[in-house]
Image (cartoon, rainbow, N blue to C red):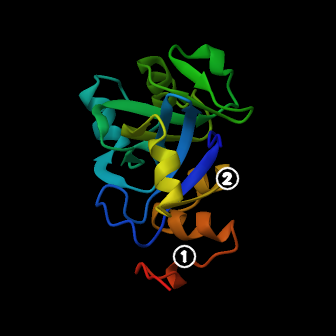
Amino acid sequence: MNLTKNFIIAMPGLLDPMFEKSVSYICQHTEQGAMGLTINRPTDINFSHFLSQLDIPLTDETLAATPIYLGGPVETGHGFILHSNDTDPGTWSQTLKINDSISLSSSKDILTAIAKGEGPSHFLITLGYAGWSKDQLENEMQQNSWLNVVADNDIIFNTPSNKRWEKAAMKLGIDINLISGEIGHA
């Protein structure tokens, strides 16, 4: 099972504070493991503050309050930009094209372009990422820690972060708030 281009949606019984009620976009899933970005954990850092830490001037002030997200517990000092491909993804150094509509970048050049209003029209910036070692995500799926569904760019880029968990589950026809977090045995 390859979960690249899928959301994994935390089940109500997953109580790990890093992943409780989370939605993660899986950017890459291979035999060696998986890498994803949690897309519904905004931090107290906004785009303006983030850019000031990198000495990048913000000329498109409409983006100043854009939240920066906690993408996961790995490399939280490193930024990752999940973005639409309406600009050529080959324009940016350090870019992984995930599919025809979305890429993952981690370079300063794309941040500079976004700050000028010249970057991709849709983007989500995280600090850190979520990573799973060989077979770890598969095992967690078998333990019913996660649901998975094909990702939806509208949820990533246009849905308020506090609604993404429920909306992602609704793609499966599930009201996730009605699922018990209790584990029972028959």
Q: Which residue is mark 2?
A: 152
Which quarter shows the N terminus?
top right
Q: Looking at this view, is 60 or 34 the one in front?
A: 34
Q: Residue at x 46, y 54 (%)?
A: 140
Q: Is residue 10 above or below residue 122?
A: below
Amino acid found under the numbered disc labelled 2: Asp
Q: Residue at x 38, y 47 (%)?
A: 69
Label 1 packing within 10 angstroms: few (<14), some (14-19), many (20+) = some
The quadrant where residue 18 appears: bottom left
Give whichever of discs 1 and 2 has the lower sequence position.
Answer: 2
Q: Position of residue 72 (x, y in %)?
A: 36, 44
Q: Position of residue 176 (x, y in %)?
A: 54, 76
Camera sees residue 39:
no
Q: Which residue is mark 1?
A: 176
Q: Residue at x 44, y 20 (%)?
A: 107
Distance between mark 1 and mark 2 Cα atoms:
17 Å
Amino acid found under the numbered disc labelled 1: Ile
Image position of 147 (left or right of 85): left
